[in-house]
Amino acid sequence: MRHLLSIDDLDRTGLEQLLDLSERFIEVTHRDIPKVPALRGKTVVSLFYEDSTRTRLSFETAAKRLSADTMTFTVGSSSVKKGESLRDTVQTIEAMGIDAVVVRHGSAGAPKRISEWIDAAIVNAGDGCHEHPTQALLDVLTLRRRRPSGLDGCRIAIVGDVRHSRVARSDVLAFSALGAEVTLVAPPTLLPESLEGWPVSVCYDLDEVLPNIDVLYLLRIQLERQHEALFPSLREYTSRYGLTAARAARLPADALVMHPGPMNRGVEISAEVADGPVSLIAEQVANGVAVRMAVLYTLLGSGGPVA
Amino acid sequence: MPEPSASQTLIIRGGRVIDATGERAADVMIADGRIIEVGERLAVPEGGADCELDAGGCIVAPGLVDLHVHLREPGDEEAETIETGARAAALGGFTAVVAMPNTTPPLDDAAVVESVFARGATSVCDVVSSGCITKGRDGRELAPMGELHRLGVRIFTDDGVCVAESGVMRRALEYARSLPGAVLAQHAEDPSLAAGGHMHEGAWSSRLGIPGRPGAAESTIIARDIVLAELTGAPVHFLHVSTASSVDLVRDAKARGIAVTAEVAPHHFTLTDACCAGFDPLFKVHPPLRTDADIAAIKRGLADGTIDAIATDHAPHTPEAKERTFEEAPPGMLGLETALALTLSELVEPGVVSLIEALALLSWRPAAIAGLGARGHGGPIAAGAPANLCVIDPGLAWEVDAGRLASRSRNTAFAGRKLTGRVRHTVLRGEPVVIDGEARR
C-alpha cells in the first residue's frame, strides 16, 4: 500500500491486517508513555483545505505517538480563488522534504490528484463527497471490538444524508467487505441518484428497519441542506429519520448506535441516546488515533516491530 | 521553396473527389483562389503550376466546417489565440470555424465581433464570429443582434451557458426572424438542474461522490426550445447534444417539420462517464461525458440524419487551469486536431455512417446551418467555386501526442489514442495552408 485514498485500495485481508495493527496501537495508547519510535525522522504534513479540528488532531496525535515530526498546512479556500493551483501548493510542500501528506479537501478526488504529482505517501482524510477511509477503519475497528465474532452477517443501517456523505461511501465499502449486510435509510433526495453496483439495500422508512438491525449508523445532517429542497425542514427530518428515545426503545436489546460526529443533538440523534449505553460514539473517537497510527505506520514504517 | 500564396496556380493530383454531389476520381486545378477545373489527368497549364499537391490514395473534400470552437481571444490568450486555434483547425482539415462568444469581453458588442472577424480574415482558417443572444451572456437583455448580423454574424448563442428564461428565449427567437439566415444556437442545460454538477449524474458520479449534471438538464431545455421554435417559426440549433433522450426529441421534432438542427461533439460519441473514475479533469466537459447507451443513441441519430453536424466544442485550457481537482477545474477539452480522425475511426470504419455521410456531417451540413456557403465553404468542388479544400489520407495510422498539437493548450482527452485517417493538405482560398501534414504559417 503506497497511499490510502479509498477503502477500495484494501481487500478483506488488507483491512483485517490494518485492524489487527490498530489493536496493537490501542495497547500502545494505554501505556504510561503512549509513544513508540517507529517513525522517528519521518515528517507528516496535514494539508487541510477544510476545517476539521477533530480529524486533524487525531492524525497529528497519531503521528506524534509514532515519533514522526508533524507540520500543519491550513489552506483557506481563498488561496484557491487567488489562483494558486493545487499542484503548485503540494509541490511547494514537498520541496520542504516530507514523507506523507494527510489531505482533507472539499473536492472529490483531490488526494488522488495529489498522489499523481508528488512522491510522498498520501492519506485521504476526507475528500468532498467521495470517501473518508480512516473514519470507516475506525468504525469497523470499533464494531469489531464489540463483536468478537466479527462483522459477518451483521445488519447495519446507515441513516441520513448518504448522497453527500464521504463517510457513508467508505463505510459501505468497509462494512460490506467484512461481510456485513448494509441497508441505506433516507428519503430519495438524500440517497445517491444511482446505487448501481452498491452492495446495499434501501429502505425509505426507518421505523420499518429498526427492529431488524444490529447497528444503527446515523449520519450528520448538514443544516443548510434544508434550504436546497432536499427535505422540508429539520423538524420533519427528525420526525421521520431522527433517532428519538422512543425509536431507540424499539431497537433490539443488543443493538448499537454509531455516529461519525459532530452530532446535531436533537436532529439526527437525541441527546439521551447519544449519551446512553447503546452509543459507541465516544469509543469511535478514541479508536481514531490508533487506526491512524496503523495507517501511517503501514505507509511509512520500515515493516519492523511496533515496539 | 517560395512561400505559397493565394494567387498561385495549384494542382491537387490523383485524389478521389467527394462532395455533396458525389464521388469521382479527379485532379483539381486552382488559380487565384478559385477552382478552375476538375477532371481526370489535368494538363499542366501554360507557364506551369506553382505547386502540385499529391493526393494519391487520398480523398479531396470541401474544407471541413466546425460550428463550435472556443478560441479564447480576446481575454484568455494564454490558453489559445485566433492564430493558434486557426492553425489547429487547418491541421484538422477545417477551412471555417465559428468562434463561440464566451470570451472576455464576450462577443456581444460590434467592436469585439469586428476584431474577431478581422483577425480571422488573415489567419490560416476562416474564423467566423458568433454573437451573443443576450448582453453579457447573462440571459436577460438581448444583445445587439441586428448590428452583429450586419457584421456577418449568423450563429447567435450564449454558449457556455443556457438561455434559461423561457420568455427571453422566445423573444430572441421572434426577433431573429427579422435577420435573414440567423440561427439561435442553444447550450441546452437547465442551470437549476445542472447546478453544482461536474460530471454526468449516474452510477459513476454516485460512486465517486462528484455532484452530477443529469441528462434531463439537457433534454428539458431541448424539449422546451422545440416548442418555442414551433411557436415562433424561428430555427433553433442545438449545440453539443449528448443524451439519448435529446436525440429522440430532435428526431421527433424534425418529423413534425419543426426547424431544428443538432450537432454532436466527437467526445460524446467516443468517451463515457467512466473516464472520470480517475478524477482527471481532462475528462471534465459540459455537457458531460455520458453513458454507453447515450453513445449508441447518438450513433443512431448520426446514421439516420437526426444529427446534422459534428462540431468539436474545442475548448482549450492552460495546464494550470486543469491542474486542480475535478470539481475545481474548468470544463472543456481540445477537439480540432482529432475530430476528423475520431469520426473516421469511430463512425466510418465500424460502418455507423458512410464516408460521404461523415463528410456531410463535417462540412456541407454545418456550412449550410451557419450560412457559410456564401463564404465559399462546404463545396461543391467545381469550376468557379472558391478553393476551400482538404485532402484526407483515410488510411494513415497515427497516435495522438498532446505535446505535438498546434493548439496553445494541451488538454486533449485522447493522448495516446491510436487513430486512423489524417489530413494531408488543407487549402484555404487557394492557399495551401497545410502541406503534408505541416502548417505552412
Image (cartoon, grey):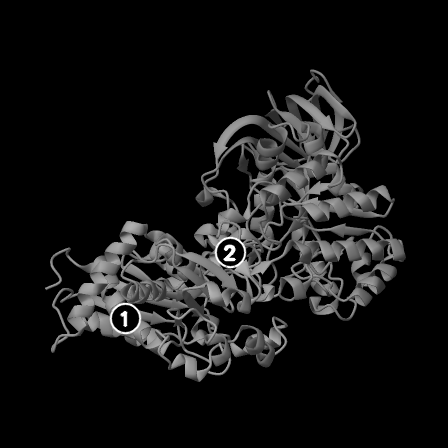
Residue B156: % across, % down? 76, 57
Residue in the image at 84% along x and 55% along y: B227
Q: Is residue B48 visible?
A: no
Q: Which is nearer the N-term, disc 2 or disc 1?
A: 2
Pick the front one: B439 or B76: B76
Residue in the image at 37% along x and 75% along y: A278
Label 2 resides on the chain identified as A
Asked whether the residues under the numbered discs 2 and 1 touch, taking CB atoms below 8 Å apart as contact, a structural biologist would say no
- The C terminus of chain A lies in quadrant: bottom left
Residue in the image at 37% along x and 57% along y: A174
Pick the front one: A11 or B7: A11
Q: Which mark is residue A186?
A: none
Cα–Cα gap, marks 2 and 1: 28 Å
Residue A45: % across, % down? 27, 69
Q: Which mark is residue A287?
A: 1
In the picture as drawn, the residue positioned furthest to the front comes out as A253
Compared to residue A130, the image places residue B90 above or below, namely above
Element at label 1: helix
What kind of residue is marked 1? Asn
Label 1 resides on the chain identified as A
Q: Is residue B360 visible?
A: yes
Looking at the image, residue B225 sits to the left or right of residue B233; the answer is left
Element at label 2: strand
Looking at the image, residue A114 sits to the left or right of residue A160; the answer is left
What kind of residue is marked 2? Ser
Residue in the image at 36% along x and 63% along y: A136
Pick the front one: A26 or B277: A26
Pick the front one: A127 or B376: A127
Residue labelled with disc 2: A201
Residue B275: % across, % down? 50, 47
Tell me the quarter of the picture where residue B178 sits.
bottom right
Residue B97: % across, % down? 67, 47
